Amino acid sequence: MKTKNKYLIIIDLAIIMSSIFAAIILAKTDILVNILTATKELEIIGSFVAGLFFTSAFTTAPAIVTLAEIAQVNSIWIVAIYGALGAAISDLIIFKFLKDRFSKHLIELIEKKEGKKRIKHLLNLKNFKWLTFLIGGLIIASPLPDELGIALLGFSKIKQPLFIAFSFVANFIGILLIGIVARALI
């Protein structure tokens, strides 16, 4: 059982490292910039595609720039809605990988250390779950990597339909703020 858990943790880390590596390649080769630039003139498609890339640490910066540029000449509400839809889809994919597996494996690692009972008690407190829910939402709404926020939401035991709605609303607010700031800077 212990060997299986170590193997699963290694697989989780390999998946995370692979996604980071792919994101770095996208950013370094300008493939992402070309994709985002090509769809920029198309308000809905451009917002959706930029939203897809809004969630990852390595693709957030070009996505923010693209969303800001689209919002400067189009409806910030349309940009926020379709950008949030794309971001929620990306978050859902990450959620499927991270929610149970990463949180479960992290808890298993924590439990093996001293103070096992105190940490386990802390993780089961209702206030701790709400705090992780709040912090996770703030991270998703911000330009910070959504992976961290999603892992925190895994601790709150959020159900998938609620997660989708929550992700959409958090990303909508974040993208709407980007549009408002972009318009203010014109």
Image (cartoon, rainbow, N blue to C red):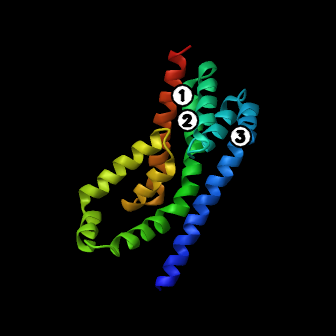
Of mark 2 and mark 3, the one earlier in the sequence is 3
Amino acid at dot 1: Trp
Q: Position of residue 48 (x, y in %)?
A: 64, 39
Amino acid at dot 3: Leu
Numbered disc 2: secondary structure = helix
Q: Residues within 10 Å of mark 3 (few under 14, many from 20)?
A: many
Amino acid at dot 2: Ile
97 over 62 or under it: above or below: below
Q: Position of residue 102 (x, y in %)?
A: 48, 65
- Farthest residue, direction front: 114
Residue 77: which numbered mark, if any? 1
Numbered disc 1: secondary structure = helix
Please tell me which residue is depicted at 60% across the width and 44% down the height of the picture: 58
Please tell me which residue is depicted at 64% across the width and 59% down the height of the picture: 18
* Left or right of 140 in this view: 67: right
* Left or right of 121 in this view: 136: right
| Labels 2 and 1 touching (C-beta < 8 A) | yes
Of 48 and 178, nearer the camera is 178
Q: Nearer the viewer, mark 3 or mark 1?
A: 3
Q: Which residue is mark 2?
A: 81
Q: Which residue is mark 3?
A: 32
